[in-house]
């Protein structure tokens, strides 16, 4: 009799049932067909299959997914050029190119679907926020344009929209800097306690620290204010202090020109080591010139009278 056994469609015999098979076997053939279909398509479930034969034929012979970059063909889509968009919900849809708007920033030309710009004439591309624009002149992201006169060992200076070469002497002139040889200073030179070796001084001056009327009490002599100090003792006892001498191992000196020092009691710092171990007797009405020197940061000041009763 013509009733075979099968699990998959390919195992079914197309000529069964035969004409001589009894009618009573018809239900057996129907049950076999149902069993084969369920075994062959195990994952269809209760959903309807709506894929067309043409769409299924696209998968004919395909055993793996297309790699990244492989062209995706559209079936049943019309209306010109389209692109496939991932819609963010796990699905994709075909979109026309007209759904996308292209905007050109300053200095950027859009012809059809092609952007273009002239880097040389526009000075360079610059990205600002989400817009690609072209900046004029020399600034961040710009393309520098070097002048034809730039040569080896030049310093570069931005001049408008160009970069020009400057020699060392030209740079010194540009920034009004003092050259290594010659030149005239127009401002303060602060050495900041650094060593200056082998200077040849001519026509020099020292800063005069004019205290004026002392008026009794404590009077500090700050060496950073000047190394030639003048003052007048006029009322009450005066006590001198010295501050900000050079650091130890450096010599520091100052000259005190004191008027009427003997008119009141004058007290000196205990760190002063006087010549002959005795402070000079100051002039009651006149000028005394007294010098002080230290080589240990003010621990000891060597004091002596350079001239008494000078006027």
Image: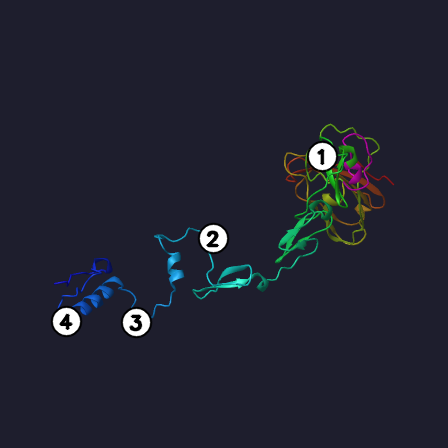
In the drawing, does residue 99 fall left or right of residue 161?
Answer: left
Residue 151 position in % (x across, y down): 74, 31
Q: Secondary structure at mark 3?
A: loop
Q: Can you name the residue that lies furthest to the front here? A: 19
Residue 110 position in % (x across, y down): 66, 55
Quarter of the image with the C terminus is top right
* In contact (CB < 8 Å): disc 1 and disc 2: no
Question: What segment carries the magenta color?
Answer: 171-188
Of mark 3 and mark 4, the one earlier in the sequence is 4
Q: In which quarter of the view is residue 174 placed?
A: top right
Of mark 1 and mark 3, the one earlier in the sequence is 3
Please give the residue where the numbered disc 4 appears in the rendered image.
23
Residue 224 position in % (x across, y down): 72, 44
**Label 1, label 2: how many angstroms apart (C-alpha)?**
105 Å
Whether 163 is among the magenta residues is: no
| Nearer mark to the viewer, of 1 and 3 | 3
Of mark 4 and mark 2, the one earlier in the sequence is 4
Please give the residue where the numbered disc 2 appears in the rendered image.
71
Please give the residue where the numbered disc 1 appears in the rendered image.
275
Q: How is the image coloured?
A: rainbow
For label 4, the crowd category at 10 Å Cα-Cα, with few meaning under 14, some 14 to 19 and many 20 or more, is few
**Label 2, label 3: how many angstroms apart (C-alpha)?**
33 Å
Residue 235 position in % (x across, y down): 79, 54
Q: Main secondary structure of the magenta part?
A: loop
Residue 6, which numbered label? none
For label 3, the crowd category at 10 Å Cα-Cα, with few meaning under 14, some 14 to 19 and many 20 or more, is few
Q: Secondary structure at mark 2?
A: loop
In this rendered view, identify the residue nearer to me: 22 or 80.
22
**Label 3, label 4: how many angstroms apart (C-alpha)?**
32 Å
């Amino acid at each position: 009799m013509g009733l075979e056994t099968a699990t998959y469609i390919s195992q079914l015999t197309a000529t069964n049932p035969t004409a001589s098979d009894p009618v009573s076997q018809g239900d057996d053939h129907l049950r076999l067909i149902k069993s084969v279909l369920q075994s062959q398509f195990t994952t269809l479930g209760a959903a309807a299959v709506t894929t067309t034969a043409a769409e299924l034929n696209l998968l004919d012979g395909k055993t793996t997914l297309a790699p990244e970059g492989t062209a995706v063909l559209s079936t049943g889509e019309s209306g010109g050029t389209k692109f496939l968009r991932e819609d963010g919900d796990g699905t994709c849809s075909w979109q026309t190119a007209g759904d996308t708007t292209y905007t050109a920033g300053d200095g950027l030309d859009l012809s059809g679907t092609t952007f273009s710009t002239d880097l040389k004439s526009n000075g360079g591309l610059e990205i600002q926020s989400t817009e690609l624009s072209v900046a004029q002149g020399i600034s961040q992201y710009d393309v520098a344009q070097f002048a034809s006169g730039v040569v080896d060992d030049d310093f570069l200076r931005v001049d408008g929209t160009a970069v020009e070469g400057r020699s060392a002497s030209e740079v010194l002139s540009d920034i009004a800097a003092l050259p290594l040889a010659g030149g005239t200073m127009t401002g303060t030179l602060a050495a900041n306690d650094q060593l200056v070796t082998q200077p040849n001084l001519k026509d020099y001056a020292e800063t005069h620290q004019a205290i004026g009327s002392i008026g009794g009490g404590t009077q500090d002599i700050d060496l950073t204010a000047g190394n030639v100090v003048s003052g007048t003792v006029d009322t009450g006892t005066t006590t001198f202090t010295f501050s900000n001498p050079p650091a130890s191992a450096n010599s520091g000196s100052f000259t005190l020109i004191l008027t009427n020092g003997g008119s009141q009691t004058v007290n000196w710092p205990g760190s002063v080591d006087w010549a002959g171990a005795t402070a000079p007797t100051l002039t009651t009405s006149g000028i005394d010139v007294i010098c002080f020197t230290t080589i240990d940061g003010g621990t000891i000041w060597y004091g002596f009278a350079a001239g008494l009763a000078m006027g």
